[in-house]
Amino acid sequence: MRHFVLGLLLVATFGASAADKTDYLPPWNTPPAGLQFSVPPVDAIADLHGDIVDPQLVLFFAGNQFMVVHDLLEAFKQAHPQYQRIYAETLPPGILAKQIESGVLVMGNLRITLRPDVYTAGKDAIAEQQKQHNWFADSYDYARNPLAILVARGNPKHIEGLADLGRADVRVSMPNPAWEGIAKQIEASYRKAGGDALDHTIMDTKVKDGSTFLTRIHHRQSPLRVLQGESDAAPVWSTEAYFQQQIMHFPVDTVTIPAAQNVVSTYTAASMKDAPHAQAAKDFLAFMQSPAAQAVYRKYGFMPPH
């Protein structure tokens, strides 16, 4: 599959060897064929994928599915060879929603005015946006995902569950509720594990003293902070921990959150009423319901929608 990968992600460098830096820095996927020029962390593109010039299909994916996009689009192109120029973004859903509202996204020196044909986000977020904006022509639930805690290999802080994230000696990487929907689900789990007191400790007291770091793009920052030793624990979607641990073989471990304290999110794909490529949007939404698409999501640890 041919992709032209663009984006801007500035990250801190490791205090380790140059090889370690290269191994850990995004984009965490094999780049497409062609002239390669990328200088992490100064100029490294991670969450804009594909053909930005005259695309036949434009997709806005919830950012935690960045690892799925390349295999998924390859499978779609095989099923629908008439679509070869596809552009996709894997940014936080709240940022994507603002991009849809404003019609513009600026990343560094790049200004993007492409409108999506299909937008994916959590089921509740899609329902709320439909209620507020009446954006969508059709929708389909395609995957589910529980939460987990990402920690350094060997779990040096002996974190056993969410309650330990309230400890003063545990540095937490936490999605910012202002634009990352996962934050609300994590806070719901905090309240299940330790009531409002635990949620207040992690999201107020520890934010103020600096031991909770609020991310702007958690699916990149949280794993990287754990890998760099800047955070001890990061509540993430279980597939993000699975990807880092099993697919990339990075030195991290996963702490399972028990079902009674966990939250399972359902992901929904929705075609836009004003989709610039309406037929392509219909074809992609139908493809998301196919065994081929579901097989890609299973490969990366996602649960089926029902």
Image (spheres, rainbow, N blue to C red):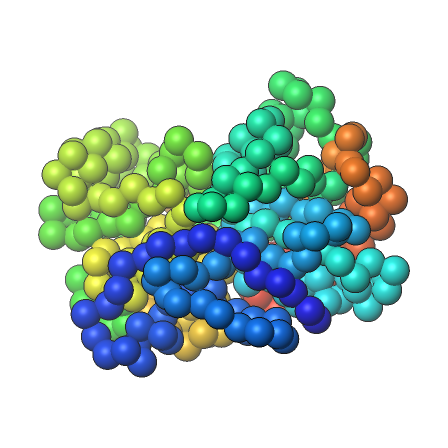
Q: Is residue 253 above or below residue 197?
A: below
Would you identify the image quadrant in which residue 99 lies? Answer: top right
| Residue 220 to residue 33: above or below | above
The foreground one among 261 and 46 is 46
> Which x, y percent locates residue 79?
84, 64
Figure quadrant of residue 9: bottom left
Report whether residue 193 is seen: no
Residue 71 left/right relative to 208: right
Residue 227's quadrant in the figure?
Answer: bottom left
Q: Position of residue 173 (x, y in %)?
A: 29, 49
Q: Residue at x 36, y 74 (%)?
A: 22
Q: Is residue 86 left or right of residue 171?
A: right
Residue at (27% x, 59% y) in the render: 12
Q: From the top left corner, tell me how far across and down residue 129 is, in percent.
A: 62, 26
Q: Is residue 126 visible?
A: yes
> In the picture shown, does residue 207 fall above or below 151?
above
- State which quarter of the image contains the N terminus: bottom right
Q: Residue at x 24, y 79 (%)?
A: 17
Count of number-bearing discs: 0
- Residue at left offset 56%, top offset 53%: 48
Q: Nearer the viewer, residue 27 or 154?
A: 27
Q: Is residue 209 left or right of residue 243?
A: left
Q: Is residue 106 above or below residue 3?
A: above
Q: Residue furthest top?
A: 132
Task: Please state which of residues 249 and 82 is positioned toward the viewer in this rendering.
Answer: 82
